[in-house]
Image (cartoon, helix red, strand yellow):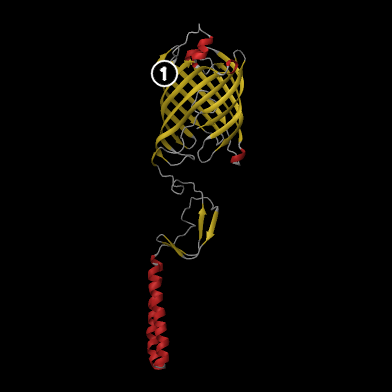
Amino acid sequence: MRTQRRFVNWCGLRRLCVAVVLLCVTGADSFAEFHEQLQNSFVQRDLVSDSMMLESPIIDFDSACESCEPIVGSQVIGSQVIGSQVIHGHDVPTQQHCRNAACRNEAWDWHLLPDGLLWHSYLADPHDSRMSLTVFQDDNDGRFWDAVLGGRFGLLRYGTGGASNPRGVQWDLQGAVLTRLDMDHSQDVESMDYRFGTEITAADGPWAMKLGYFHVSSHVGDEYIERNPTFQRINYVTESLIVGGSFRPTNATRLYAEFANAFIIAGGAKRYQFQTGAEYAPIAKVAMKGAPFAAINLNFREAVDYDVSTTVQAGWSFWSPESERRLRFGVQFGDGPTSQFQFFDRRETYLGLGIWYDY
């Protein structure tokens, strides 16, 4: 289009130069005849130019995205071509936030190894997959470190892209090693629980759900056996199918429940397990300053006659809007059957400090 305009303007300029030369050389009579032709050429040029402009689509940003929220920032540009569209002196939006999927570029599609998760770990579940370190004092058995080395990630998603508030269906893998160290005996390894599994998760708006499988096996540390030679280790194992759901009444709160049915059990494990909980974790107005959090998890296992294991946490957290991962510092209180399944029938009441990195 620009080339056509330049061609028309060049023709008009050339005719004007010829007219000036004729005026100087041949006089007024010849110039008058040429002037009439020149006027006709200018009229033709204007018609061509107007026709080109009428054929070109004009962007009207007032109606281009009727469902968009007010424009955050804009800049004024002159008449120019963007792609195949001509813009004439409009405010071109440089940043905008839209409510519908089309404006937000949230069309559902397949994503291999997607960013982010549709289902996140429970904040106060001491047996979930994450990275964490907790030091605590047990009323009966002494001082311990609980170290968790784990992770959770997506393999495949059908839904919206990105990690920020995604929607769709996703296939996840997750796993963790949960180790207990005895601070009163040279940081000896007392026990270790291994957990891994795979899940199909789904999320849309405030609702989320998961359906999957996980394996749990528990092992005792060599140092603990050396100090307690009469201890009879058990091969605590569960292979379970799980189903869970969560709901967010507000952006800062989350309610959840999960049911597990073990189809393989050993070492004193029983078939059923149920847990539920609530979380309060508001988004900080300034991400680098963080915000408070509080969470409670209640775990009921058939192996301990459904005696509830209660975990309560509170503290300060830092949340990333890009990855939706969370770093937390705080206190943890626990009461009930232990989370280390090698000693599954042991009760503990403790208070400690922890740091948690959540997926």
Is 137 in front, or is 107? 137
Residue 279: image location, x then y, percent: 56, 29
Instruction: Residue at 56% x, 33% y: name it.
Output: 327
Answer with the quarter of the image where residue 332 lies.
Answer: top right
For the question of whether residue 305 can be seen, the reply is no
Q: Dividing the image into 4 quarters, which one contains the N terminus? A: bottom left
Residue 356: image location, x then y, percent: 55, 29
What is the total number of numbered labels drawn onto the structure image?
Answer: 1
Give the residue furthest to the top: 230
Is 327 in front, or is 103? 327
Q: Does residue 233 lie above or below 65 as drawn?
A: above
Answer with the quarter of the image where residue 44 lies.
Answer: bottom left
- Amino acid type at circle 1 is Ala
For the question of whether residue 255 can be seen, the reply is yes
Is 45 in front, or is 195? 195
Is 24 in front, or is 48? 24
Q: In the displayed structure, does residue 131 sit left or right of residue 51?
A: right
* Residue at which label 1 appears: 262
Residue 326: image location, x then y, percent: 54, 34
Q: Does residue 88 lie above or below 36 as drawn?
A: above
Q: Does residue 34 lie above or below 208 as drawn?
A: below
SS assignment at label 1: strand
Crowding at mark 1 (Cα within 10 Å: few <14, some 14-19, many 20+): some
Residue 194: image location, x then y, percent: 46, 21
